Amino acid sequence: MSVAKKQYKRVTVKSLIEMKANNEKIAMLTAYDYTMAKIVDHAGIDVILVGDSASNVMAGHETTLPITLDQMIYHASSVVRAIDRALIVVDLPFGTYQGNSRKALNSAIRIMKESGGHAVKLEGGAEISKSISRILSAGIPVMAHLGLTPQSIYKFGTYTVRAKEEEEAKKLIEDALLLEKLGCYALVLEKVPATLAKKVADKLTIPVIGIGAGADVDGQVLVMHDMLGMTHEFNPRFLRRYLNLYEEMTNAFQNYIKDVKSLDFPNKKEQY
Ligand code: KIV
């Protein structure tokens, strides 16, 4: 059942801006591989984020810092091969865009050329403005990301809610306005108070997509493995689980083991 206000054959960065103008919420999920991307695209998702959260959920690292540009390109090209409709946004990984705008441009060009993704996402505000401008000057759409920025985890020390204090909230609003002015087409706001997120979404004409940022923004994003309940050790308040795949998959694996050990599998019909 679709609740879309307008049917898009292919979602583009322009579609997202139009959705905000039409008060249609944007639905975004992460994906990192062909099979999952195909399912979520056919389900009608608007945006697929090939997030650097692949470092956590696919590779088992504690943080997003270790994932490389080559690894992000591998994940993104698998997703691109699966997609008919969704906009594909690819995270620039840690160390490939901060402090050197030429390097940032080269990293973004590699993502676009080698994976076929449609846009990139970068974490940060004023401090990465030169990198953002240079990437935009090559015609590459940029999604920004403020609030909890996991690539800076060692600066903050925890994954708790950001911008609760007035000073940090003021800086976040300034950064958001700057990012829009630079030409970013959307902004992800992660784990900030809902009232602040609403304020930002009201001030900007570009869509604000929240994760742990409340309902009064222009769209929502979750990590696919979390919303499917494949991960069970991660339980933030903002996470709604739509399945308990951890339990369902465990049952399936245990049934298979039991059937193999008991000689129930394969049966006569399951052999040649
Ligand atoms: O990498 C990621 O999955 C993200 C989302 C949490 C927004 O950046």
Image: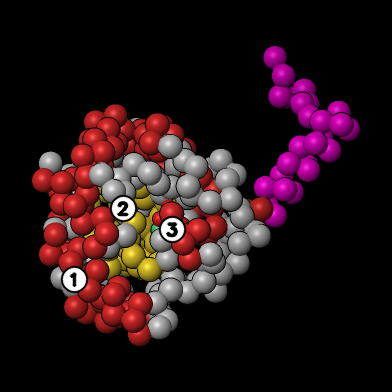
Of the two numbered discs 3 and 1 on the same chain, state the one appearing first in sequence: 3
Above or below, 124 against 74 in this view is below
Count neighbours of disc 3 (C-alpha within 10 A) and say few if under 14, some if 14 to 19, many if 20 or more.
some
Question: Ligand 1 closer than 8 Å to the CB at disc 3?
Answer: no
**Looking at the image, can residue 9 be seen?**
no
Give me the disc on residue 152: 3
Q: SS at mark 2?
A: strand
Q: Residue furthest toward the right?
A: 262
Left/right placement of residue 253 relative to residue 202 reads right
Measuring from the top left, give residue 47's x and y in whole percent.
31, 53
| Rendering quadrant holding ligand 1 | bottom left
Task: Read off the residue under disc 2.
Answer: 122
Count neighbours of disc 2 (C-alpha within 10 A) and say few if under 14, some if 14 to 19, many if 20 or more.
many
Specify the principal SS of the magenta part.
helix
Between 22 and 164, the one nearer to me in the picture: 164
Q: Residue at x 35, y 85 (%)?
A: 166
What is the magenta range?
247-272
Q: Quadrant of residue 111?
A: top left
